Image (tube, rainbow, N blue to C red):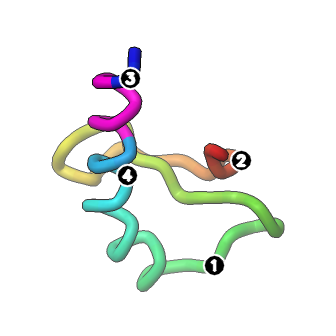
Amino acid sequence: MAVASGATIGFVAACAAVAYANSQPPAPGYCWLYTDPQCTQDFWDVCPH
């Protein structure tokens, strides 16, 4: 589980710059999340803690 969580955090960080540059969150505490390594499938959701 810890390995999967670490991989997810790295994956989110890699795509985060693209999301931040393109749009602002719909509400405080929301993050733009990607479902694929190419950063093309995405959605807004509550930021992971």
Give the distance between the C-alpha atoms of the residues marked 2 and 4, in whole angstroms.
Answer: 13 Å
Residue lying furthest left in this view?
Answer: 38
What amino acid type should be assigned to the residue bearing mark 2? Val
Q: Is residue 46 above or below residue 1?
A: below
Residue hosting label 3: 2
Neighbours of disc 3 within 10 Å: few (<14), some (14-19), many (20+): few
Q: Residue at x 28, y 47 (%)?
A: 11
Residue lying furthest front in this view?
Answer: 2
State which mark lies toward you, 3 or 4: 3
Give the distance between the C-alpha atoms of the residues marked 4 and 1, in whole angstroms.
Answer: 16 Å
Residue hosting label 2: 46
**On the picture, is 20 further left or further right than 46?**
left
State which tag comes first along the sequence, 4 or 1. Answer: 4
Give the distance between the C-alpha atoms of the residues marked 3 and 1, in whole angstroms.
Answer: 30 Å
Give the distance between the C-alpha atoms of the residues marked 3 and 2, in whole angstroms.
Answer: 20 Å
Q: Is residue 16 above or below residue 38?
A: below
